[in-house]
Each structure stands twice: as structure tokens, then as C-alpha cells.
Amino acid sequence: IEEELAATLARGGRDLVLHYQPQVSGRDGEICGVEALLRWRHPRLGFLLPGAFIGLAEDTRLVAKLDEWVLRHACRQARKWPELTVAVNISPCSFERHGLAGRLLRIMREERVNPNQIEIEITESVLLKEGKSAAEELLHLRSQGVRVALDDFGTGYSSLNRLRMLKVDKVKIDRSFVQPIGETADSTAIVDAIVELGHALGLLVTAEGVETERQREYLRFIGCDEIQGFLFSGPVPPEAISEMLIEE
Ligand code: G
Ligand code: G
Ligand code: NA
Ligand code: MN
């Protein structure tokens, strides 16, 4: 499967597709951005989700090429949605090769997209191996207007220290804290604390995995900036996003 992935990338990623999941304002439910999520239409194995191949791509260093493919195609789509922020996931492994920020900025330039429109999502683990150099790559990206979101926040090791070291614009509360809102007091308290901490540090806060009205109501009540989840929409093909924008 690694060989097939390398082959499809060598041919311009013909079998790869991006779906997009809306991120909506916590206040009024308007779409403010989308997250690009990769899928692979595999000729034999069918429609593959990233869980089936991202790990392999990370093991074989293909993932940096894959992330670049995703950014390039997300940029092409971003030009059709000037009012939206387009978020792409960047694997921690992509930071291992030197000069990530320069490579990503070059793609934005080649695709004629303002870096202000692009957000990259990283996980706390980027600091595990790469430490200082990852922090410098992020500073470089942010100096050109790219926003940085810390994904799956709350699940990593020593989150608070990382949050201080990694300069980011946004934290995304992991869905494992969002889903039990209203059911377990502990999770609700953690969500409250993340929103408060994020705001105290001047960050935007997004809640992931929002599936019920009750979760949405609560998140609005505590001032969570953006929400993302099946309640609004799962990941969908780009045409479906364009339709949502027309309906809005
Ligand atoms: O799309 P799905 O809902 O199955 O996403 C599962 C995981 O795959 C998510 O954690 C997401 O971060 C990761 N993922 C999705 N698209 C990409 C991508 O383009 N690049 C990388 N590195 N990870 C991705
Ligand atoms: O790790 P990351 O946050 O990038 O993962 C995004 C993944 O979360 C995608 O696989 C997407 O399908 C999934 N997802 C998005 N919204 C929801 C939701 O409301 N509930 C659940 N269970 N998964 C979701
Ligand atoms: Na993500
Ligand atoms: Mn996440």
C-alpha cells in the first residue's frame, strides 16, 4: 500500500480527494472555515479514510509529500471560497525535514492564495522530537499570516507547558471532552477550563465533535468561538460546502 501511495503521488495524486468539514461560529452558526480531510479512492480497497494509510505514510516519510499535496489542493479550493479559512492537517513527521515553513509558503505563493486564508492544524507531539526547530517553523509561518491551530487539545502530555512554548492562534478541544458535556461534571469542567485558559492567552477556541444541540447550547453559553461536528455537518465533498455557502 505504501508503494501504491507513492505511485499515486508520483502521478499527481489522481486517486486522492479532499473532503471538507465546516467550522461554524459558536455565536450564530455561520460557516467561518473548513477543515480539509484526506480520502483515498483506492482502486482495489475502495474509499479509504486517513486512519487506513496516514500511519503508513508517516512510517515511510511519504507523509511530507502527502501533506504538501493536500495543501496545494486545499489552496486551489480556497480560491473559490474567499470568505472561508481553510485548515489543513500537518503531520508531526512533516516537521522532521528541514524548511517546512518555506515549502508550505511556496505552495501558497504558487497557488496564489493569501497565507491569511490558510490555517495549519498540528498536534502537541510536534514538540516532542523537533522542539525548537518546530517552534521556529511555526513562527515563520505565523509571520507570513498563516494561522496555527493546536489539534486534539487536552489529550497530549503536559499540555499547558506546550501551549506556552508553541506559539499558536487557536486550540481545538478534543472531542473526547466535548462529547460528555452535560453528562459528566469532570468533562464539562475541563471544557470550561480550556475555553477560559485559551481566552486568557488571547487564543480562539474551537470545540470538535459537537453532535447534539445540548452540547452546542452549552458551548455557546461559555463563549466557545467555533464549533465543528456532525451536528452541523460531517466532512463532505467541496460542492456540498459551496451549496451551504449559497444557502447561507
Ligand atoms: O478524516 P477522518 O475523519 O478519518 O480523520 C482522521 C484523522 O486523519 C484526523 O486525526 C486527521 O488529523 C488525519 N488527517 C486527515 N487528513 C489529513 C491530512 O491531509 N494530512 C494529515 N497528516 N493527516 C490528516
Ligand atoms: O484529529 P482530527 O480532529 O483532525 O480528526 C477529524 C476527525 O473527526 C475526522 O475523521 C472526522 O470525520 C471526525 N469527526 C468530525 N466531527 C465529528 C463528530 O461530530 N463526531 C465524531 N465522532 N467524529 C467527528
Ligand atoms: Na485536525
Ligand atoms: Mn482533532
Image: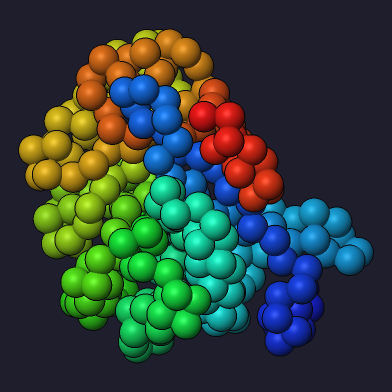
Number of marks in picture: 0
Q: Give percent across and percent down for residue 196.
A: 15, 30
Task: Give the residue displayed 58% in from the left and 74% down from the top.
Answer: 69
* 60 displayed left or right of 79: right
Residue 51 seen in the current view = no
> In which quadrant of the rendered view does residue 101 lie?
bottom left
Residue 150 seen in the current view = yes
Q: Quadrant of the N terminus?
A: bottom right
Instruction: Return the residue nearer the eye: 240 or 183.
Output: 240
* 140 displayed left or right of 20: left
* 99 displayed left or right of 199: right
* 86 displayed left or right of 116: right
Vertical comparison of 222 with 116: above or below: above
Task: Give the residue displayed 54% in from the left and 57% down from the top.
Answer: 80
Q: Give percent across and percent down for residue 138.
A: 25, 70
Q: Residue furthest front?
A: 246
Instruction: Return the residue nearer the eye: 239 or 176.
Output: 239
Vertical comparison of 66 with 44: above or below: below
Q: Give percent across and percent down for residue 187.
A: 32, 23
